[in-house]
Amino acid sequence: MPKVPINPIPSSRLSIAEISDSGGWRLFMRMAHEPLEAGQAISDELAQMWPEAVLGIIFSEAKSGATVKARNDFQRWKSAFGTMAQSNPELAVDIDLVDMHLAVYEDRSFAQSDLERMRIVRQNVAEGDHIGRGLACNHLCNIALQMGDFDLAQKYAEQAIRAYLDGKADFGAMHLHTHLAQIRLMRGDLDGANDVLRSMEAQLGRLPGQAQWLISVARILRAEVAYEANDLEQAKLLFRTAFNHVEYKDAWFDILTAAYRVSTRLAFAESGLPGALEALSHAEQMAQDRAMPRLYRLMQVERVRALTLSDELRAATNLLSEIGVSTDRSQLEESQDLAFRQGTTFVAVARLMVRNRRSQDALSFIAPAEDLAIRRGQLLSLAKLRVVAAMAHWQLGSRMEATTSLLSAIRLLGEQPFYRFILDEGPQMRFIVQAALDGDYVSVRPTRSQRRRLSEMMQYWVTQGRVNPGQEKSDVADLHHRYIELLALGHANKEIARIMGVSDNTVKYHLKQIFRDLDADNRGRAVQRARDLGWLDT
């Protein structure tokens, strides 16, 4: 994805006194406000006279993407503010709240100690300071989310919403709806997540001020929901309308991670590995430019996923080793590695093991990962792990266990419209879906609802993104048909390259895609299956 020029957000120039009278940082929780900018240069003398206003400006800088400047400004006045806070408990609380606010927008890793610290801050908030209490609970929610404790995160999100509303800070309350939607998605409640986000957009539209950047955050998350439901066109539309706002204006760490994940997966679904690698290169460069090593690491895990799904197994294995992701079962539960607090990493590692024909190792790895997912309430990750386990069982010849694991994954998510995480696994999963649909190797036959879901997946695989009969074929489909025709005529790779005017490597890449789409392991079988599908004249 190409870089987009950063467009500065218009700012509101207020005097130091006006910023202080508006509540400093609390102004941003009451309404969608433009970034604050002092109408005069801030000297050390002014900062000491109006510390709450300066903290408000620093808070604003982080929200508008200037996290490095915000942190530098905070450090510049921290000592002076700390001295003043010794006799001003309200200022002491504000210093801690703004410090944690910066950390949320930075690449800070949170731990139990941060949770305990913020609990103490919440206790110290003045009794009538509802917005201060709301931000403390907001921070607690962010920390719990990053630690993978969804139950705790939801509890703090609900407390933050109540506190913000008590302080008439409706806009602050809206931020927490993004967290609730993320929690619902990770718990496997796709419809619930979408309802929260759509309601959030509608409410934001009725609030005073310009809330476009928070609306864009909601749309990025809706794009992820649409992707999981295999509504790729809707996902692309939502993503395109929101990405620039999110990338450059008001996205905290979790939202940036979601945005780049959606970008990569949509690119992979549309253009295969080349598209995914282009999107990842952009995401990784942005992570480096912003000095966000954890974001960069998570994008490396996405790179492992794309390489594995493209059967570039050596490259995926080497990359996993380079980024130092441990697969030692004894270390998983106590690991402070953010990559393993994200269920997607467990799935990526297990999938790579299966593709490397290490199915028994994969099952040994999946068992404790499933236990962690259950205890953390990560039902979507649990379902994805069971799909990978199904492939491992199938590879080991345990057909009954494979279909049981697949149907268990579908049952976990009930009637929720999840499709993509099964479809993404490709031809290997297709055999298992077909067996379950046919009632082969099953201990309990699938329900009518499950059969409908399985049938829809098989239909998708048969068409593989090709257009419906009677519609004009896509350029990619035409290209692949031409390659198949040349294969059927018996041409070697070099001859095909000469005829098509491309390199040998390009031919190999396209043939690999065609073989995968047709579930064929050699030329003869690919040609026969193409005939069966009506791609070739008989």
Image (tube, rainbow, N blue to C red):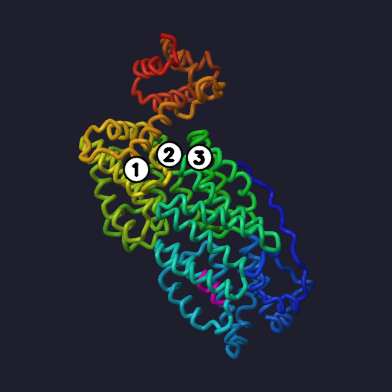
The disc labelled 1 sits on which kind of residue? Arg
Q: Which residue is mark 3?
A: 231
Q: Which residue is mark 2?
A: 307
Label 2 secondary element: helix
The disc labelled 2 sits on which kind of residue? Leu
Q: Is residue 277 visible?
A: no
Instruction: Categorize mark 1 by other alpha carbons within 10 Å: few (<14), some (14-19), many (20+).
Output: many
Residue 198 pos. (x, y %): 56, 53
Task: Give the residues drawn in magenta, as a range.
Answer: 132-138
- Label 2 and label 1: CA atoms lie apart by 11 Å
Magenta span has 368? no
Residue depicted at 61% across the width and 59% down the height: 203
Q: Is residue 524 visible?
A: yes
Q: Nearer the viewer, residue 84 or 215?
A: 215
Instruction: Categorize mark 2 by other alpha carbons within 10 Å: few (<14), some (14-19), many (20+).
Output: many
The disc labelled 3 sits on which kind of residue? Asp
Q: Relative to residue 256, is residue 18 depicted above or below?
A: below
Q: Provide the major secondary structure of the magenta segment.
A: helix
Image depth: mark 2 or mark 3 in front: 3
Residue 174 pos. (x, y %): 58, 63
Magenta span has 133? yes
Q: Relative to residue 536, is residue 329 depicted above or below?
A: below
Q: Nearer the viewer, residue 342 or 434?
A: 434
Label 1 secondary element: helix
Q: Which residue is mark 1?
A: 351
